[in-house]
Image: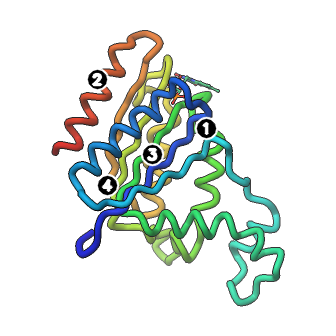
Amino acid sequence: MTGRPQRILRIDSSARYEGSVTRELTGRLVERLSALAPGAEIIERDLGPGVPVVTEVSVGAYFTPPDQRDPAQHRALAPSDALVEELRSADVLVLGVPMYNFTVPAALKAYFDLVARVGLTFRYTEQGPVGLLSGKSAYVVVSTAGVEVGSTADYTTDYVRQFLGFLGITEVQVVAADLLLADAGRLDLARQRIDALAAA
Ligand SMILES: Cc1cc2nc3c(=O)[nH]c(=O)nc-3n(C[C@H](O)[C@H](O)[C@H](O)COP(=O)(O)O)c2cc1C
């Protein structure tokens, strides 16, 4: 992270724009982080409109050496290649994750399927898979209406941690804006946590 300005990649996955809690909080985090890192470049990846899902052609292409891919495989890989490059270039990730039916929105799952690329973002070794994106840190904003983050019904937070760890991103801070239906005051706690995290 030294020698060049930081690059912050903000990834939003809420289907909503108006009134989106996660978008408000990822925006707040990016604002705070960039105030601390003048010259930082902000990249915004909005998954709200959706991203392509993997297909038989793209999965086949993942496991075909680049010089042996046919034109259809190259075409199928283009969205994945671009997202992988964007992710690799970032120093800091700010990820907005609304809980949808106990887990992540389908668009975020589809994004994960596109950026988990053998040889690019992880590789297999005799000791098991090794993530290739070490050296990055991540902030994960999880928002829920009725499920408490960390409870047995939360299949979101640990899943995101697991996925990021699989790619080698292990420095992860979670900001919970949970149980908002029961207690709107928890949103303010999330805002305060963001301010404290960015000041740390
Ligand atoms: C399709 C859908 C599924 C949801 N599923 C859950 C859920 O399983 N548990 C929960 O606590 N909240 C659930 N919610 C509520 C959202 O997690 C909550 O409203 C969150 O703040 C949404 O993020 P956003 O405000 O950034 O859009 C769901 C909302 C939607 C739209």
In the picture as drawn, the residue positioned furthest to the left comes out as 200
In the picture as drawn, the residue positioned furthest to the bottom comes out as 67
Disc 3 residue type? Leu
Disc 1 residue type? Pro
Under tag 4, what secondary structure?
A: strand
Under tag 3, what secondary structure?
A: strand
Quote the CA–CA distance across marks 3 and 1: 12 Å
The x, y position of residue 164, in whole percent, is 45, 55
Is ligand 1 within 8 Å of the beta carbon of the residue shown at mark 1?
yes
Is ligand 1 within 8 Å of the beta carbon of the residue shown at mark 2?
no
Quadrant of ligand 1: it is: top right
Label placed on residue 158:
none
In the picture as drawn, the residue positioned furthest to the front comes out as 39
How many labels, in total?
Answer: 4
Quote the CA–CA distance across marks 1 and 2: 23 Å
Label placed on residue 105:
1
Judge whether 106 appears above or below 118 on screen. Answer: above
Nearer to me, 149 or 177:
177
Disc 4 residue type? Glu
Quarter where residue 5 is shown:
bottom left
Q: Can you identify the residue that label 4 sits on?
A: 171
The x, y position of residue 26, in whole percent, is 41, 40
Q: Earlier in the sequence, mark 3 or mark 2?
A: 3
Count neighbours of disc 2 (C-alpha within 10 A) and say few if under 14, some if 14 to 19, many if 20 or more: some
Quote the CA–CA distance across marks 2 and 4: 22 Å
